Amino acid sequence: MDKRIISGAAALLVFSSVTAGCNEKKKPVPSDDTGVFESESSEPLFREYTDEDFREINIPLTYKDNAPPMEIGCIDISGFDFGEKVPVCNKEEFAEEYYTNRFESYTGTPVYNWKSFAGKSVKGYSNKCYVWNGKCYIYVTYECFEYADWSLYSCDLSGSSLKEIYSWTAKDLDERCYRNVFFSEGSMFFTYYGKDGNIPTAAAKRLDLETAEITTLYEAATKDISIWLNADDSGNAELQEYHNVSEIPTVTYKYDSDKDEFVKEKETEVPEGKIMASNSFNGVYSCLIKPEHGHRYDLVNDYYRVKTSVTTGRIVYADEKLAILYNNVKLHIYDLEKMEHCFLDISDLGSSMAMYDGKLFIGCRSNEIRMPVYCMIPELGITYPIVEEGIYSDIRATAEGVTFNEISHQENVIRSGAVRVDENGEIQEEYSVMGENGGVSYVYAGGYSNQYDKIDKIYTVKMK
């Protein structure tokens, strides 16, 4: 195994914090520099193990009420009113074009009555939240069909001093921002689509949370390219560049905070197989590799290679002495000092999890199931509920502790056509349009209903 390949990938994923205060700047072509640098430190002793080298221990879960000393804070934003906006598709100058031309049935008749949408506003809701540097940042969307205006708000950790720090609205039907934004180290990353004449454009941008300045990190103007922005397993910005016409394979870029740009990722193929998952903790980059001739994954970093028993999953934590894997049912703990392989069935606890201070915070089995968020001591199986039952999401570790959200299900409705109340008190909508001869000319499909998960509370956890 050539460990330099793994070290090179590590350099791509472990970056310093994002610089603040950058001015707006365009970078049409991302760098081809892979960001791979030779390490000046001596190479650590490398060890190789098979799963059989470890003593297997099945650890049952033990539930207790007296959780370890921790400070749990709650930022209640459920009462915040983010107002309403008229999305571009509902503006008076665009509504007829959008609902008449873009939504037609197989008969060629309009699906929606554009007059029912013209001028109609939609209510904003808290879509994502991020706690950083003593503030809570709230990404608010105003959605209607594929369009969504958005605003970014901030408040203090007591849930007061709400302030809008940035607002974005599409100018015409060709402009849109996708909702897959994410936060990392003082920045919010998002994608923008527009047109330059008849040529579609795509861009990835970074919003500095302190200055509210926008930096364009990537830009393309061609019908061949579409992009997808997300976070990799280590929480770093990752950009996928897809080619719609040409036969060029998908290109992956990683955000380099030192250069403040996306750099092309080194190939994820390694001589022994393919990297299926990766993560970085305390400066140790680890990856799960699927061998060319086998199903069980190998866990590899600069310190060791372990032929594990898992055939799918992700890295929850890994350093030079300990590795924790999750295969969607069980937690697998490899202790490289005690040479023990412990496993726990955590299928009832949820799939959203984060390690902090040697504890595993876990919950969110489903957005339909009310349950607590738990704090677990993995090597002992001791599990403590730390909040009451609720619907929670997005458990994540930060530099200061752990955060997660409590959500509720909501709905935005815009009705199309005439509305009446039937004999049972139920609201009914009339969609039929009468022709000149008194008969039904065509029937509208109905109004607009958008069901979404609204963030009501943000919890912060710090160990004492």
Image (cartoon, rainbow, N blue to C red):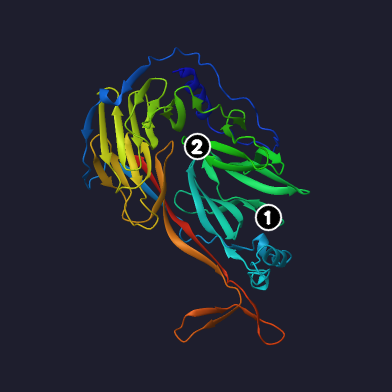
Disc 2 on helix, strand or loop?
loop
The residue beneath circle 2 is 232
Q: Secondary structure at mark 1?
A: loop
Residue furthest to the right: 197
Which residue appears at 69% of the width and 35% of the height?
Answer: 27
Which dot, 2 or 1, sits closer to the camera?
A: 2
Q: Quadrant of the N terminus?
A: top left
- Disc number at residue 170? 1
On the image, the x and y values in percent for residue 50 come to 31, 23
Q: Quadrant of residue 328?
A: top left
Q: Position of residue 379 (x, y in %)?
A: 25, 34
Give amino acid for label 1: Ala
Q: Earlier in the sequence, mark 2 or mark 1?
A: 1
What is the count of numbered marks?
2
Q: Can residue 15 be seen here?
A: no
**Residue at the image position 41 percent from the left and 47 percent from the top:** 404
From the viewer's perspective, is residue 370 above or below residue 248?
A: below
x and y, in percent, of residue 444 in the image: 61, 73
The answer to whether residue 265 shows anywhere in this view is yes
Of residues 214 and 293, which is closer to you in this image? Answer: 293
Residue 150: x percent and y percent?
Answer: 60, 54
Q: Is residue 181 left or right of residue 101?
A: left
Q: Residue at x 69, y 33 (%)?
A: 29
Q: Residue at 52% across / 42% down in the picture?
A: 183
Toward the viewer: 46 or 181?
46
Q: CA distance from mark 2 to mark 1?
A: 28 Å
Does 156 appear above or below 446? Answer: above
Q: Amino acid at mark 2?
A: Asp
